[in-house]
Amino acid sequence: MVLPDVKIISGRATTYLAEKVCEAYGQEMTDVEVQEFSDGEFEPIVQESVRGSFVFIIQSTFAPSDNLMELLLLCDAAKRASAGYIIAVMPYFGLARQDRKDKPRVAIGAKLAANLLTVAGAQRVMTMDLHAPQIQGFFDIPVDHLDASAIFMPYVETLKLDNLVFASPDVGSTKRARQYAMHFDAELVICDKHRKKANEIESMRVIGDVKDKNVILVDDLIDTASTLTTAANLIIEKGAKSVRALCTHPVLSGKSIEKIEKSALTELVVCDTIPLKETSPKIKVLSVANLFAKAIRNAHEFKSINSLFVHKKK
């Protein structure tokens, strides 16, 4: 069977990552020109034919919302150019925290974004560490949900830490942290927090024993860093030897960097799904480029995606 050509396109927000994906894949990125109007409106124009091709459009949809709009316009452009198959590659899927109606008169932003992508022409979505895995069900098209544990677990192995304990910074991340604890045959502790309102913690307690342990917090994203740094400080107060954190998506808004530097965290390990606005000696970035390049190759060759990303113990 002769496979269609692959075209890899990038939105402007994620060019830094798309270039690394193309290098790992072994192909040049398809050129896109963006025409900008004086009022801020923009129009992306694909500069070569994509007729009949597998088109992978790479764009994380972090703020501002123009990043999502650009992804939608690129999908529509590929559809109208008679692309054979259109895959929206969103290393970070913004709006994923808006996944339910937890109070009256609120939107479910994750579902709306899923509908918009489908209408724009996406026939498949490739993403990583959704805020809640069930968001895959919001899409009426296939979703390849990659797991950052394939990147983080080998890194943790290189640390060679004894008395290892994994921790969830809140109840919502318990399942994610348990996956790491099971892999490393380690204990699991939970930080139970109570919020007054969004991004503001009223109280927190640690459930489990961390005394004389090397603790690793696990979460899908870090935004204001309030939850993570509060958890890290509390864990050290409870007698832990050290505390690190693995967070896939470095949203890092507000004074998050300052909080991290002042916290008890030894290290914060993140992925490059979102570009860092500023850095810190405490922050280490691991790239997802090779993982997405493999996923793109397997999707193009109609091979399994999930079977690639199960990290096996040495």
Image (cartoon, helix red, strand yellow):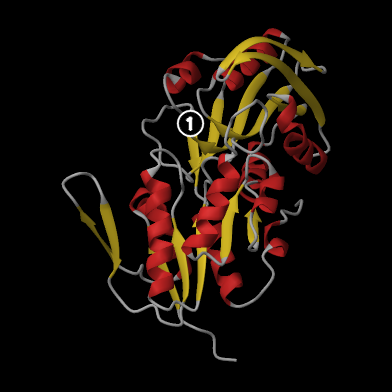
The percent coordinates of residue 203 (x first, y second) are: 67, 8
> Is residue 248 placed above or below 139 in the rendered structure?
above
Instruction: Please give the count of numbered marks on the rendered protein.
Output: 1
> Is residue 52 placed above or below 258 in the rendered structure?
below
Q: Secondary structure at mark 1?
A: strand
Q: Which residue is mark 1?
A: 283
Q: Residue at x 68, y 41 (%)?
A: 132
Is 47 left or right of 84, judged from the image as shown?
A: left
Q: Residue at x 57, y 60 (%)?
A: 125
The percent coordinates of residue 74 (x first, y second) are: 39, 62
> Is residue 255 placed above or below 47 in the rendered structure?
above
The percent coordinates of residue 214 (x first, y second) are: 70, 24
Amino acid type of the residue tagged 1 in the rendering: Ile
Depth order, front residue of 146/79: 79
Q: Residue at x 65, y 47 (%)?
A: 154
Is 194 left or right of 163, judged from the image as shown?
A: left
Label 1 crowd (10 A; few <14 / some 14-19 / many >=20):
some
The percent coordinates of residue 88 (x first, y second) are: 50, 60
Q: Residue furthest bottom?
A: 1
